[in-house]
Image (cartoon, rainbow, N blue to C red):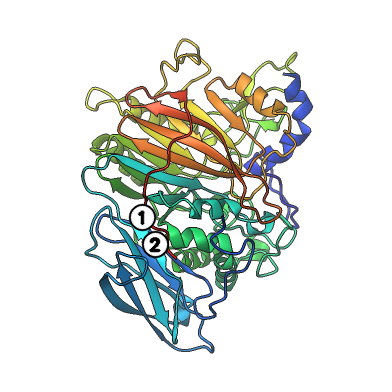
Amino acid sequence: MGRPIKVQPVRPGSSRREFFKRSGAGTMALAAAPALLPLGAQAATNTVFQHGVASGDPLSDRVILWTRVTPAAPKPAVTVTYVIATDPTLTQVVRRGSAKTNPGRDYTVKVDPAGLKPATTYYYQFSAEGATSPVGRTKTLPTTGAQSLRMAVVSCSNHAYGYFNAYGRIAARADLDLVMHLGDYLYEYGPGQYGNVRTPEPAHEMVTLADYRMRHAQYKRDADSQAMHRQHPLVAIWDDHEITNDAWKSGAQNHQPGTEGDWNARVAAGLQAYYEWMPVRPVNVANLRENQRGFAYGDLAELLMLEQRLSARSQQLTAATHVTAFGPGFAITDPGYGDASRTLLGEAQQAWLINRLRTTPARWKLLGQGVMFAQLKAPGANQATDPGLYFINGDQWDGYEPARNRLYAAIQGDMAHSKVDNLVVLTGDIHSSWAADLHPNPYNPAAYDKTTGAGSLGVEFVGTSVSSPGIDTDTTGAIAGAIRFYNPHFKYVQLTRRGYMLMDVNRDRVVGEWWYVDTVASPSNIETFATAFEVRTGENHLRPSAQTTPRANPPALAP
């Protein structure tokens, strides 16, 4: 991902930023082993609704509709009306309503109209202050009879690091049911700290409520972001940068209490702005850190979205004792590594997840989450004297091995519970593309067969970033090849390209496609299909696949 240039001192330990920084230096060691809006334009031609419209958290009978009003002068309250119709010209109206907004919610508007029909495309528009918003398009979830689900998966959209060309390409796909955003929707850094293609607002790291609101506002003015939000409902979770880098329950790598204040106050500010500016339905208004949510896509798929940062995560391991080609590495004997009390999810969320996996009637269990679930190891820097393999990223599930093993135990089943089949983990965070079979110990050929996939308990598709950097020095694929050599469960690793995943689900298989844009340094409409893998029902391991066919005659895009 690249290590941002930072003024603050860096805490010791292994983070994913360090992983990508080290990767460039370690290359030799391992190798030896048509637009909807004007491109790049600020879409704010409408001064009242300059941040566009959005929808999200669809259910079978409702969906969150969002906008933000910018009055000509500050007002204590603004009344906003909305209309929902079944046609793009808004003549077949099914709902009308109104809401009030005020400075206390930064003039944002969220409505949650009930009584909509399942599996139906709707069009909507807001009005306020004598102006109308752009027309938005959304869709409710099915209840029965669902035969297919088609969605884009994105993460890590860093405004400072480049243009959101991937969002623009997603917006042009009329046949999508939704977009899943797996976190790092925005980044906290100041100018030049992590990208210099565009200048962040405010011109310093965001810490206060005003800072977070201003940064959200900047992202929502981006033309490609507006286009994606306008055309598709969003199902989103946060990762760490919505608050700050490598966050955990009681702090973060990029939070210094002496200069940036109380951690809980910063989290409260970041989450207040997040819920104001995102089309997300709060799980618990008394505790906004809770964000795990489930979405039933008929009996075809259950979308289970996890919160892995703020509600329960234990602090990342810091005492790495080994040196790998990528820098510090962790062994299972390192301090804290085998501590069963350390957690990513916490007991309550873990119990919720296991219960949903065991009881859902859905064919496919799609687990949307932030950090890589599959193991990732690298060899000791000097194989002659240190022939071992070591975990290199303590921020992902590798740093929480006992917690991961508890989930594996639930997936495998026991005397009282059946095995969980058809688990598909969808992951962001790492600014690169990966496909993996999942097993508690994929390095043991007696337990997992890398050729046939026998023994695999599920699969993981990891999507690259919208704009944040990966290992851009891996132009020959040498690092990716070495990673696959030492990690036999990975079937695809691509470390340099930006874009999104397209997931195509039917009752027989789930196909994951990687689509890449040609650049993030400037606006562009060019995208390229790279590769695809699939998992077939009941098999729980990956196979090579092919590009899927878009749906015929999808509902019209919003005008």
Which numbered disc, 2 or 1, marks the residue closer to the eye?
1
Residue lying farthest front? 553
The amino acid type of the residue labelled 2 equals Arg
Which sits in the foreground, 64 or 353? 64
Give how far across and how far down residue 326 sits, in percent: 71, 31
Which sits in the foreground, 458 or 409? 458
Residue positioned 22% across, 26% down in the render: 416
Secondary structure, mark 1, is: loop
Give how far across and how far down residue 278 sits, in percent: 45, 63
How many numbered badges does the structure rendering display?
Answer: 2
Kindly identify which numbered label has been placed on residue 99.
Answer: none
Give how far across and how far down residue 517 sits, in percent: 62, 46
Query: Mark 2 highlights which residue?
Result: 137
Give how far across and how far down residue 271 sits, in percent: 48, 63
Please say whether residue 64 is visible from this viewpoint. yes
Q: Please determine whether, in this image, residue 466 is positioned above or below residue 196.
A: above
The amino acid type of the residue labelled 1 equals Pro
Image quarter of residue 452: top left
Point out the tag, 2 or 1, that comes first from the N-terminus: 2
Residue positioned 37% across, 45% down in the render: 552
Image quarter of residue 376: top right
- Left or right: residue 67 compared with residue 82: right
Query: Mark 1 highlights which residue?
Result: 555
Which sits in the foreground, 306 or 135? 135
How far separated are the C-alphas under marks 2 and 1? Answer: 10 Å
Question: In what quadrant of the picture does the N terminus appear?
Answer: top right
**How busy is the neighbourhood of tag 2: few (under 14 within 10 Å), some, or many (20 plus)?**
many
- Left or right: residue 505 compared with residue 438: left
CB of mark 2 within 8 Å of CB of mark 1? yes
Secondary structure, mark 2, is: strand
**How busy is the neighbourhood of tag 1: few (under 14 within 10 Å), some, or many (20 plus)?**
some
Residue positioned 35% across, 44% down in the render: 303
